[in-house]
Image: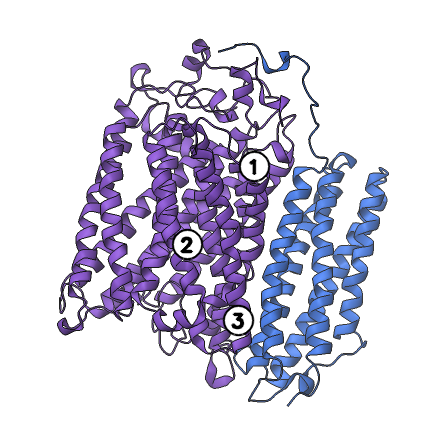
Amino acid sequence: MRLAGDSEVSTLETPIGPATGRPPFLSQLHEWVTTVDHKKLGSMYVVCGIIYMIIAGLEASMMRWQLAWPGQTVLTPEEFNRLFTMHGTTMVFFVGMPILLGSANIMIPLMIGARDLAFPRLNAFGFWLFLFGSILLYFSYFGGQGLYGMGSAPDVGWFAYAPLTERTYSRGHSTDYWILGIFVAGIGSTATGINFIATILGMRCRGMTLMKMPLFVWIMLVDAILIVIALPPLAAAQIMLLFDRLLGAHFFDAQAGGSALLWQNLFWFFGHPEVYILILPAFAYVTEIIPVFSRKVIFGYPLMVAATVAIGFISLGVWVHHMFSVGLSPLINAIFMASTMLVGVPTGIKMFNWTATMIGGKIRFDTPMLFSIGFLCQFLMGGLTGIFLATVPFDWQVSDSYFVVGHFHYVLFGGLIFGILAATFYWYPKVTGRMMSETLGKWQFWLLIIGFNMTFGAMHVSGLLGMPRRIYTYQTERGWDLWNLLTSIGVIFQIAAFTLFAINLLHSAFKGRRAGDDPWDAWTLEWSTTSPPPAHNFDEDPVVYSRRPLWDLKHPEDPDWKYE
Amino acid sequence: MSTAPMTAYPTPPEALPQDGMSNGKFGIGLMIVSEITFFGTLIAAYVFYIGRDINPPYPQDVLEVSIAPFKVLFNSVFLLISSVWIWLAVRAMRKGRMGAFIFWWALTVVCGAEFLVGTGMEWYDMIVNDGVWIGTNLFGSGFYTVVGFHAFHVTMGLIVLTLILILALLGHVTPRNVEKIDLVSWYWHFVDGIWIVVFSVVYIFGNQAIT
C-alpha cells in the first residue's frame, strides 16, 4: 500500500496538469466517453448531478418568484405545473440518484481496498443510461406535443397520479417522456445497485470482514439492496402506464374497471423506499465525517449497522402513509401509521450515535463538519414533522398542504443536500487533489442555513394556515402573504449560497491549495492512496486489521485491532 | 507517522480470506432478484384485476388449458423440461464433454423455440378468433403484459443461448468457460421458474368464473 509522504509516486500518478501540457481536447473527450474507471464515472455522475441541481434549483426559483406576492402573473398555470413536475422529478431522479451513485462509485472501491467495481463496463452502461434518460426527460420541452406543437414538459407532478396521466387527460407525449426518461435511468440505477452489492460482498481486501467495513460501505450496501428491490416495481408500473397510453390497455382506466388506486400503491411501493434510498447516503456521509472531525471512533458501530438494516427493512412496509387521505380502511391506516412511527426508532438510534460521537470529542469546525452539524439539526426537524405526518388525523388535516412540502424539504434538502455538501467538502481533496476554500465554504454554510430555514420553515406555517401545494397563485386575503414572501426571500440567500458553491468548486479545481494524501487526518483506506488516486487505486493490495486501518498505521503503539 | 507496511504489524490478528462466491454469481443472482420484483409487480397487478372486468371476454371464455400440440400445457412441458437439458449441458461441460454439451444445449434452444412458437400460435388464436387484444378489456391488458414480458425474457434468453451455441459449434467455447455458461443457465432456470408462477396465476387461479 502507498503511504502518506511518498511524494515521488504521487507526481507520477497525478493527472497531467497545465504545467506538463494537456493532451488534445478530442483525446481527452474520448478518454472520458470510453472510460470504465469508477473514479471517472463517479465524478461524471456527481458533475451531472450538480448541473441538474442548478437547473432544478432555477425551476424552483421561478416558482417562488411567481408565489412571492398574491396574484402574480410571472408564469401561466400550465407553465407552473410543468415547473413543479420537472423540479421534483429532476431533484429525485437526476440530482439525488446520480450524486449518491457517483459518490458510492468513487468511494466504495477505495474504502474496501479494491481495484474497481465488480463490473466496470456495467458501471459505464449504468452511467450512460442515467445521462440519456435525463436528456430524454428534458427533451420533452421540445418534443412533448410534437415539434410542431412547440413541445412541453410533463405537468402531472413527480408521482404522476393516474388517471391524470391517462391519454384522455394528458394529451401529447409529455407524460411518455416522463415515463421513458425515468424508466431508462432506472434500469441504469438498478444495474449500478447490483454492481455495488457484488463489489461490497465479493471484492473487499484481505482482513476486511463485514463488521470491519467502514459504515459508509455498510449503509451503501443497504442502499443498493433497496435500489435493486424498489426500482423494478416502478419500472413495471411505468410499463403498465405506457401500455395504457400507447397501446390502449386499461390498467389505470377506471371506466373499464381499472384502478387509479393501484398506481398509487405501486408508485409509493417504489416511492417510499426511494426516499430512504436518497437519505441513507446522507447518513453514510456524515457517519464518516463526524468521527474524523470529532477525533473519536464512531459511537456504537454494531448498532449503526443494525439500525441501517432495520431502516432498510421497515422502509419497504410504510408506503401507504402517502395515501392516508385516499380513504382506505381505518385498520390499514393504523397498521401503516404504526410501521411509519417505527422508522423513528432506528433513525433515532443513529441521531443519538452521531451526537454521542461528538460528545467529549475535540471537534474541528471545518466546513465538512459544519455541514454535518447542519444536517443533524435540519434532518431532526424534518424527522419530527415526519412523526406528525405519520399520525393519521394530523395527516388528514395537512395532507397536500405546504406543511408537507416544508417537511420533505427539511428531510431531502436539509438532510440529503446538506449531506452532499458536507461530502463534497470532505472528499473533494481526494478526488481532485486540491482543497476547497474554507472561507467561501463557511460563507456558503451560513447563507444556506439562513435561506434554507427562511424558505422551508415559513412553508410549515403557510401549510398550517391552509395553503395547498401546487397552486400557481393565491388571493391576498388568505393571510398567506407574509409567509410566502419570507419563503421567496429565503431563495435569494440560497441562490447566493449556491453561487458561492459553484465558484468554490470551479476555482478550487485550478487554484485550490494542494491537498496531499490525507488532509483531514482521517482513518479509512481511501486516504492512504494519492489524491487523486491512480487508476489502479492502490500500489499494493491493502490488508486491514480493524475498522480504522489508517489509525493503526499512524499509531502502531495503540492499534484499534487490540480492542475490537 | 510510521511508514512501515501494514503487514509488519506486531502479531497481526486473523487475516481473513474473501468470501467464496464469484462476482458473476452475485451479479446474475441479484439481477434475478430485481427481475423477480419486476414480475412480482406485474403479477400482483394481474391478481388485483382478476374478476374486476366489466366487459367480456373473460379468461374462462378464452384460455384453453390443454395438452394438445402447441397448446399451453404442451408448451409449458417443453419449456420446463429445457431446464433439465441445460442442466445436463452444463454438467457435460464440467466433465469436458463438449459434444454432449452441444447436444443438450441445442435441445434447450429447440425446446425454448417451441415454447415461443406455441405462445405465438396461442396469441394468434386469441387475437384472430377470440378478438382479445391488449385494449379489449382488463383481462387482455393483464394477459398480454404478463405473458408478453415472460415471452420477451424467453426471447432474450434464446438469443443468448443461440449465440453460445454458434460459438460452441465454431469451437470458441471451451470447458474453461464453464462458470460463465453456468450463469447463463441460471437465467434460463429463472425464466422457467417464473413461468410456473405466471402459468399458475393466469391459467389456473385466474381462469375460473368469478363474477
Q: Is residue A143 among what the camera can see?
A: no
Kind of residue indicated by mark 1:
Tyr
The residue depicted at 63 percent of the width and 56 percent of the height is B156
| Residue A119 in the image, given as x and y percentages of width and height | 58, 38
| Distance between mark 2 and mark 3 Cα atoms | 19 Å
Q: Which chain is purple?
A: A
Left or right: residue A496 compared with residue B199: left
Above or below, A287 against B109 in this view is above
Q: Nearer the viewer, residue B1 or B207?
A: B1
The colour chain B appears in is blue
| Residue A56 in the image, given as x and y percentages of width and height | 29, 52
| Distance between mark 1 and mark 2 Cα atoms | 22 Å
The residue depicted at 65 percent of the width and 47 percent of the height is B28
| Disc 3: which residue | A334
Q: Nearer the viewer, residue A113 or B133?
A: A113
Which chain letter matches label 2?
A: A
Per the rendering, the mark at residue A383 is: 2
Q: Is residue B74 among what the camera can see?
A: yes
- Labels 1, 2: one chain: yes
First in residue order: circle 1 vs circle 2: 1
The residue depicted at 43 percent of the width and 57 percent of the height is A182
